[in-house]
Image: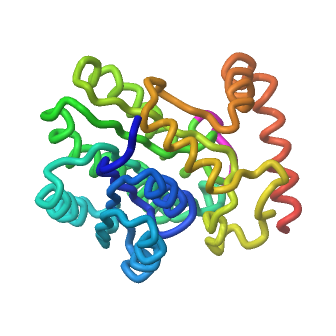
Amino acid sequence: MDFKNKVILITGASSGIGKQSAIEFAKKGAKLILVARRKDKLELVAKELEKFHTTILVCQCDVSDKDQVKEMSKTVLEKFNSIDILVNNAGFAIYGTVSSLSIDEIESQMNTNYFGMIYCVKNFLPSMIEKKSGHIVNVASVAASFGLPGIASYCASKFAMLGFSEGLKHELKGTGVGITVVSPIMVRTDFFDHPSFEKMPKFSPTSLSSKTVANAIIKAANSPRLEIITPSIVRGAVWFKHTFPYLINPILGKAFKNISDSKK
């Protein structure tokens, strides 16, 4: 796809994967709508994108608040009539066992990671269907396929995102609108800056750069596939886990016990 003058909305655009995706799309001449909770950080990103001489709209919005998303979408649609690509990237995790996390902490992850995506889809999908074109890119994680101890509630939000996307993909057949999930392994961003990860190792040697994931998002924006796992070699691990769970699950349990013991 030629992204020149395409209208692309990115949530969680103030840092990390969202910011890098904005940069990569801007390089290709796309018009960008940057969405995040902190306007000051969004404006810094917008200033950085000025060198690409493209249209930038900054929208302060907490995607976990459906009323804010409704107002944001109204502003966007009044300016652009519709969008070409919706990138649902906003998300975070809180590390901790289910027994130690509060209900509010569990709900907050689902509200941003899953319902935030739902709110954006519900507000922008009708205009996409009306013009018979567009693509939704939902940024999930390999945690959409692995129930990992310590981040069970985060995994649940990404499992939900993948399941919703699969069902929606069937519904969108023949409409001209596509949907693709991008599921990366660990990425070197401020994702792990939450205090709950304080005693956790920040990044593994195999962790990805934001640019690698941003390139996968660009690929996804023009892909007929349901899911793009990055790096692609990890798709084999996902297949293995689903095919031989009795081998993989004990390994995950042991790894979690080792991590828990090291934090004591």
Q: Residue at x 33, y 20 (%)?
A: 170
Magenta stretch: helix, strand or loop mostly:
loop
Highlighted magenta segment, given as a residue range: 145-150
Does residue 30 show up? yes
Q: Quadrant of the C terminus?
A: bottom right
Q: State which quadrant residue 143 falls in.
A: top right
The reply to whether the magenta stretch includes residue 15 is: no
The percent position of residue 96, horizontal first and vertical second, equals: 65, 60
Tell me where residue 22 appears, x and y as whole percent: 46, 59
User: Residue 247 falls in which quadrant of the image?
Assistant: top right
Task: State the image quarter where residue 163 is shown.
Answer: top left
Q: Residue at x 32, y 57 (%)?
A: 31
Foreground residue, 136 or 25?
Answer: 25
Q: Position of residue 193 (x, y in %)?
A: 64, 72
Q: Is residue 155 left or right of residue 117?
A: right
Q: How many numbered marks, from 0 up?
A: 0
Could you tell me which residue is drawn at 70 percent across and 37 percent down? 231
Question: In the figure, is residue 65 to the left or right of 226?
Answer: left
Q: Extreme bottom residue here?
A: 40
The quadrant in which the N terminus is found is: top left
Residue 15, given in percent of the width and then of the height, sits at 53, 68
Looking at this view, is 165 or 108 the one in front? Answer: 165
Which residue is rendered at x = 20% and y = 63% of the image? 67
Looking at the image, is 217 positioned above or below residue 242?
Answer: below
